[in-house]
Image (cartoon, helix red, strand yellow):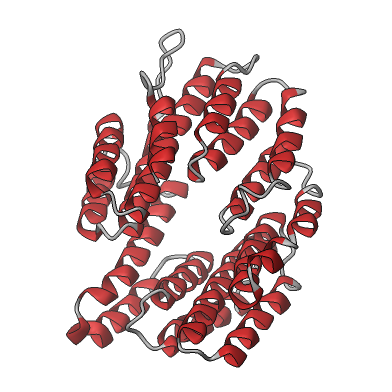
Amino acid sequence: GAGAAGAAGAAGAGGPSGEAGATVLPQHKQQLTLALARTLAETGQLARAREVLRALRATPGAAAAEGELATGVRLLEVEIAAWSVGEARAEQRARIDALRKQAQALPTPAERVVALSRAGAVLAHHENLPAEGAKAFLVLARDALLGMSDPAARAQASGEFLVALGDTLLQDVRHHLARGEWTRGRAAAAEMTALLKQATQPDTVARLMALDMTARQLTAGQDAGLARLAEASAAVAKDPSLAGQAGQLRSLAAVPGAARDPRFAPLVDRVAAMAEGKQGLARGVALTQLALLWAEQGMDDRFVDLRRRALETQGLSPADRVQIAADLLVLGELAAVRRLHAAQLPAEAEARVRKVAGYLM
């Protein structure tokens, strides 16, 4: 757990430096603040996550913003409400009803699909809730998805829905196996494999493949899950965008044991070598994604190496260079927070949270 902390510390040494007076754009800093709020929520610090969102809404211009930031804030508010369902057992039914109304009140069909999908996936992680509660939200999400008319927006929302459904199936597998229900656990894992056939977008395919490989590990052993790495890497290679390929490898690295499998590092090295042949933002963003992959897995030396290569990218504008440095600092630190939380090292995680909050807010 402490490995990622060391890596993130290297990322943050000195923080992003201005070049010719460049500073992080307010919109980008707001997106990174949203990432901080999400990390707090995912590590159980719901009150602090709400505080960060309130501060974000209070920043100049944020209240009137109607774009990616406003959508992100609304969706995260729904996810935080879903996480909070488990806080008070006596109020669970009322909180679930309020959560459903909150998600269904969002302004666009796409937001409603994504909110209902993510809420369902979060509810599936609550051990003291019946699985039917999560699945009811996914049924509502599917119905909302069928009512969408814009093909591009529908494709994007469909990917979110499929990943949420896959995440819910993975929790089904875990719950069945914990109760010794092996036949049901394997059936849920088989549903996950079937779900992959419905995915069309490369990012969705990679995220579902990671869930499917994890389910296979649970039902048939680690080797059975990792046996699909070659197939997964072939799917990744079809994406024409290097940043896209790097992002998909980040998804696959989340499979337990994948990042340390001897077959995995060459996949990362292949994309890094292709990125090295580029200049400007395409190279910088791809190498940043790969650096963060290693930060998330606590592999310090690899993270520091790719961080250096990303920051050495030629042909970046001053604003782009500062943005990449900010991503490496903030997202590297937040990766450390999640790993330290999982390792039950709260004081170390808190130090990282304070560092990020001090930089962003």
Looking at the picture, does residue 236 appear above or below residue 102?
A: above
Please tell me how many numbered marks the rendered image carries: 0
* Quadrant of the snapshot with the C terminus: top left
Q: Which residue lies at the image location 25% right of the left edge and 48% below the top edge?
A: 52
Q: Which residue lies at the image location 79% right of the left edge and 55% below the top edge?
A: 230
Image spot of residue 57 (x, y percent)? 27, 47
Q: Which residue lies at the image location 44% right of the left edge and 32% below the top edge?
A: 7
Of residues 237 and 110, which is closer to you in this image?
Answer: 237
Q: Which residue lies at the image location 41% right of the left edge and 73% below the top edge?
A: 125
Image spot of residue 154 (x, y percent)? 64, 66
Of residues 296 and 153, which is closer to you in this image?
Answer: 296
Image spot of residue 318 (x, y percent)? 51, 15
Q: Residue furthest top?
A: 20
Looking at the picture, does residue 154 appear above or below residue 184?
A: above
Query: Quick check: can you spot residue 154?
Result: no
Image spot of residue 355 (x, y percent)? 27, 33
Q: Which quadrant of the structure image shows residue 255?
A: bottom right
